[in-house]
Amino acid sequence: MSVSFGLSTKVSPRRHVLDLDDFGPEELDNVLTLADAMAEVLSRPIKRVPTLRGRTVVTLFYEPSTRTRVSFELAAKALSADVVSLAAQTSSAAKGESLANTLRTLQALGADLLVMRHPQAGAPYLAAQEVDMGIINAGDGAHAHPTQALLDIYTIRQHREQIGGLKVVIVGDILHSRVARSNLWGLSALGAQVVLCGPPTMIPTAWNAALNPSEGGCARPWEGAPPVAVEFSLDRALEGADVVMPLRLQRERQEGGLLPSLREYARLYQVNAQRLSRAKPDCLVMHPGPMNEGIEISPEVAHGPHSVVEEQVRHGVAVRMALLYLLLEGQS
Amino acid sequence: MTLRQAQGPAALLVRHARIVDPAQGLDEVGDLWLESGQVRGIVLAGRLLGMLPPAGIPTLDAGGLMVAPGFIDLHCHLREPGFEEKETIATGTRAAARGGFTTICAMPNTRPAMDSAATVEFVREKARMDGLVRVLPIGAVTKGQVGEELAEMGELAEAGVVGFSDDGRPVASSRLMRHALEYSRLFGLPVIDHCEDLSLAHGGAMNEGAVSARLGLRGMPAAAEEIVVARDLVLLALTGGRLHIAHVSTRGSVELVRRAKAQGLPVTAEVTPHHLTLTEDWVLGPPEGRGRGLSSVAYDTNAKVNPPLRTQADIEALLEGLRDGTIDAIATDHAPHDLVSKQCEFGEAAFGISGLETALGALLGLVQAGRLDLSLLIAKLTAEPARLLGKPWGTLQVGTAADIVIIDPEAEWVVDPAQFASLGKNTPLAGQRLRGRVVGTLYGGRVIYQVPKIE
């Protein structure tokens, strides 16, 4: 028995999900609608449909992960696909096998779709050139994390009718953040006003409008791209915010000279209750996880009434199910 | 084919050629008489330079095509000894011949580095045995090119190097660069610096700018180059000596060199064909593939080079620098790599573009677009590099070596790295259609390359 999900036929099938920068608003809506249907499956006592039975999904993670990897595994299993998970350090990659050869081997072993996370930006694009199977990017260096952005958008949609017109503030090490980039493309495509907030050492110089004179105080990441607003002051950024998304601060940034100390970062940029009072009363607080409580987010906000962090994690499975379906079944 | 095997008559008459020789201010149709490896006479409409060619000698009909002095490349990586999987002197000089270059300067970042007479002699001997064109060695500035102690410049000068460089790396220590400039004055040879502040550029894979921000790649800011250019110029004022700035790539660097020249400092500079024609956008893949999102050919490692491809504003400044003499010469920085070094993640890939065989085609695009004068272009590839070397080449003046390139400026061709003589197939121009190509190259009057008749 095959289960079909209502899919818009206006959107042409895609082979990969490498980033959100090539998703138009219709396709984003499509995925979110599909995720609704998947969420319904996950609400049943038996969280399983046979849709992808007989298909093999391989996850290949060159970086550690809890939520993303488990989320993909559960998503694949909920659709009855076979899942094999590879951590690179226990695979032959540890013997020096190249990414390309690893992928070709997995394809030869019968993988239908690959979910990969890699520390080097661009690795999934190299992968897409080397093999025929579909690829979902679970994070490539500082470049993209499309499934995170999709579940973030999906979560916002549960609380707000429209993404368009919302003020979404992303706070932290924007320079090194794939979550910030993918959210920027996805949210802007749906008409949100995205504000990037962090210390100047952590904002790409090209997006700092003050250094690159362009329209209305915003820089455009590339020709035809939506404008990016940058704000160094967290207090100013949070004025009237609908959503605030602090990013995990990596401790290595202090060693890299980008910050004098984590203490100072917390004093200037921690999302806490006092700062949050400047945002809208029903402002959502999100976090891609894992959280450094006490650094980028205070414990009270992390677990407080504004926080939807646990919802995000839950929605991650539904959104990833939607993508697996789209890439493996959506071709017909 | 090596030079020793190159076929050719002792005398040759090149007829019906459009002779372009900026050193003599020539751009007119005529015949060129070559004999015993030298230019003996040029017959132009209405005047004769040198001697009249005798009757009955072998003739090459240039059919109206352009004939210019063989190009001189001040900056080239032949990889031998040590990295023969990337290139050898044999394959590199064949690539040079295909590109119209009859004299190339070999950078010393071999293994072992060219920091001793022994290695320099090895390269010279290999070039004599296996090479197809004239190879001039460049010696290292520091022992092993590790930037700690000066190499024995005296020994290197005696061995015939034409300059000193640690290219691939800067001379990071200002104190050491000062000493290198001072000491090199003994030999009248330039110190050629690869200007890069390693602490700023550290870990960078491409230009720091809009594309690196989008791609999530660490960038190398223009400032990293400009800081060391500025430092070198300040040191030059202190020490005297000769400074040559390798592969200038930014607007700021051009301005610094311009000001220094205006102050009379003995600095010269070169620029590569890729920095004159390609922007950082090429990391996204070739223009036809760029759409709304990143195509699967984004993160093209063939566009990964040091210094990196920059912006259109930098290109404009570099072209202006060529026009007003701030930049003296065009040099390819031919940097061949094996496939394994390039077919990997962008951050891991080696830096470098294999450029000898596409240089002319890419540069003629600038002439066709009206951005660069043909005569200026040819001068920057011939007379100007010769002037910097202090050698009598780069011209078709009567009595000079018969090093000649024959160019068809209209011939359209598609860049196919599989056809390269170079072992380095790493070019972002793969598959691109260029207009203008080298159809024949002569070295010492002998044909060392000609395009196959049937394409």
Image: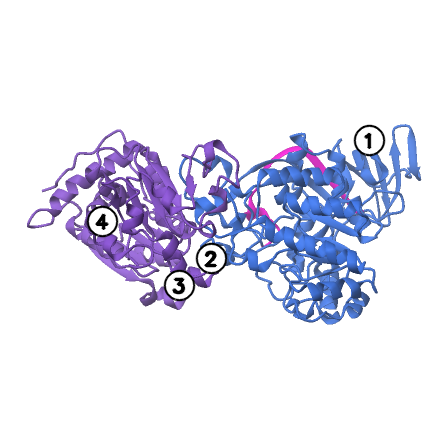
What is the x, y in percent for residue B58? 82, 41
Mark 3 or 1: the one toward you: 3
Task: Evaluate whether residue B395 shows in this view.
Answer: yes
Q: Which residue is mark 2?
A: A258
Determine the residue positioned at 23% across, 47% down.
Answer: A320
Q: Is residue A152 above or below residue A93?
A: above
The span picked out in magenta is B403-423
Q: Which residue is mark 3?
A: A97
Mark pair 3, 1: CA separation: 59 Å
Identify the element where label 2 is drawn. loop
Q: CA distance from mark 2 to mark 1?
A: 61 Å
Going by the image, does A16 lie left or right of B183? left
Q: Nearer the viewer, residue B13 or A176?
A: A176
Q: Are marks 3 and 2 in contact (CB under 8 Å)?
A: no
Q: Which residue is mark 4?
A: A307
Q: Rate crowding at label 2 as few (under 14), some (14 to 19) or many (20 or more) other CA atoms within 10 Å.
A: some
Q: Mark 2 falls within which chain?
A: A
Residue B358 visible in the displayed image: no
The chain displayed blue equals B
